[in-house]
Image (spheres, rainbow, N blue to C red):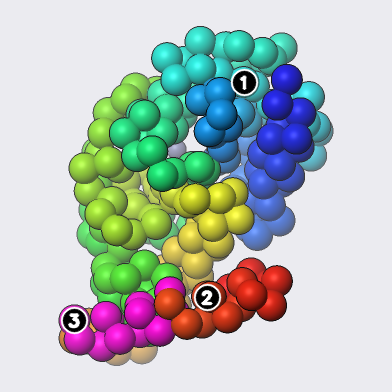
């Protein structure tokens, strides 16, 4: 069942190590099928290099395995909570990517001190509170604190991103790590300064309403 979505979810998961966002078996990506309400997610504890579409696990929104020989990711309950409470979300990603997770370790949001942060995230990248892995608590932190950002840090844990497509969630996972790395180095160079709200809004509007639209119409990922 859901063979096409299983292929997309497997391919999406393989993008995580390709972009250096995960090591070993860490991290996970899922996507929901809006017709059936079923979710396809990475299996638990499986090396990326061995992963095929057939290894993906299909679960319902209650967490019951509908199809799959392997157990679903340990973060499944978090993903399902997001889908159940944020109906526009089609894909959820979790990583411990190094620089973003360094910020998560401190419990501090990533400040909006670059146009790239304003563009992609529309403001500071929020940090939710600490929550127990394997429960809905993480999902509840995401839903409560993510706001309009496509990415959120979880205190002393890592990163979650959401998107209306797998590509959108992947892009945010790549971008949050990229800006976290740049800002971490910037703080070695000298003090950082947050952009005024007016400039955040101008950049975000240009990016979302003009740049992204133009890029999409050319068939490229903005
Ligand atoms: Zn984690």
Q: Taking 110 as reference, is 16 left or right? A: right
Q: Taking 123 as reference, is 171 left or right? A: right
Residue at figure coordinates x 22%, y 48% from the top left:
145
Name the residue carrying label 3: 197
Instruction: Quadrant for the N terminus, please.
Output: top right
SS state under label 1: strand
Whether ligand 1 has any atom under 8 Å from the Cβ at mark 1 is answered as no
Q: Residues within 10 Å of mark 3 (few under 14, many from 20)?
A: few
Earlier sequence position, callout 1 versus callout 2: 1
Residue range in magenta is: 197-208
Name the residue carrying label 1: 58
- Of the numbered discs in the image, which one, if any, rests on residue 212? 2
Q: How many marks?
A: 3
Q: Residues within 10 Å of mark 2 (few under 14, many from 20)?
A: some
SS state under label 2: helix
Residue 82 sits above or below residue 211 on the image: above
Q: Marks 1 and 2, how far apart in space?
A: 32 Å
Q: Quadrant of ligand 1?
A: top left
The answer to whether residue 200 is magenta is yes
Taking depth in this image into account, of 101 and 79 the one nearest to the observer is 79
Cβ atoms at labels 2 and 3 below 8 Å apart: no
Earlier sequence position, callout 3 versus callout 1: 1
The answer to whether residue 125 is magenta is no
Residue 87 sits above or below residue 106 on the image: above
Residue at figure coordinates x 51%, y 10% from the top left:
64
Q: Marks 2 and 3, how far apart in space?
A: 21 Å
> Image quarter for residue 133?
top left
SS state under label 3: helix
Q: What type of secondary structure mainly makes up the magenta span?
A: helix
Whether ligand 1 has any atom under 8 Å from the Cβ at mark 3 is answered as no
């Amino acid at each position: 069942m859901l063979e096409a979505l299983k292929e997309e979810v497997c391919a999406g998961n393989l993008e995580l190590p390709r972009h250096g966002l995960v090591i070993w078996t860490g991290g996970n990506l899922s996507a929901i099928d809006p017709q059936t309400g079923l979710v396809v997610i990475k299996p638990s504890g499986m090396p990326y290099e061995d992963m095929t579409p057939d290894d993906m696990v299909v679960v319902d929104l209650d967490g019951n395995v509908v199809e799959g020989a392997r157990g679903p990711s340990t973060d499944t309950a978090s993903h399902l909570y997001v889908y159940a409470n944020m109906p526009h979300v089609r894909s959820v990603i979790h990583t411990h990517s190094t620089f973003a997770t360094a910020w998560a370790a401190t419990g501090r949001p990533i400040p909006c001190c670059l146009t790239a942060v304003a563009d992609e995230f529309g403001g500071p990248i929020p940090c939710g509170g600490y929550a127990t892995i394997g429960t809905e608590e993480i999902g509840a932190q995401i839903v409560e604190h993510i706001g309009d950002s496509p990415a959120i840090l979880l205190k002393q844990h890592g990163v979650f991103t959401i998107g209306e497509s797998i590509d959108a969630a992947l892009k945010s996972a790549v971008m949050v790590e990229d800006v976290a790395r740049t800002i971490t180095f910037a703080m070695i160079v000298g003090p950082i300064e947050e952009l005024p709200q007016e400039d955040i809004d101008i950049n975000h509007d240009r990016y979302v309403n003009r740049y992204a639209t133009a890029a999409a119409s050319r068939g490229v990922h903005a």
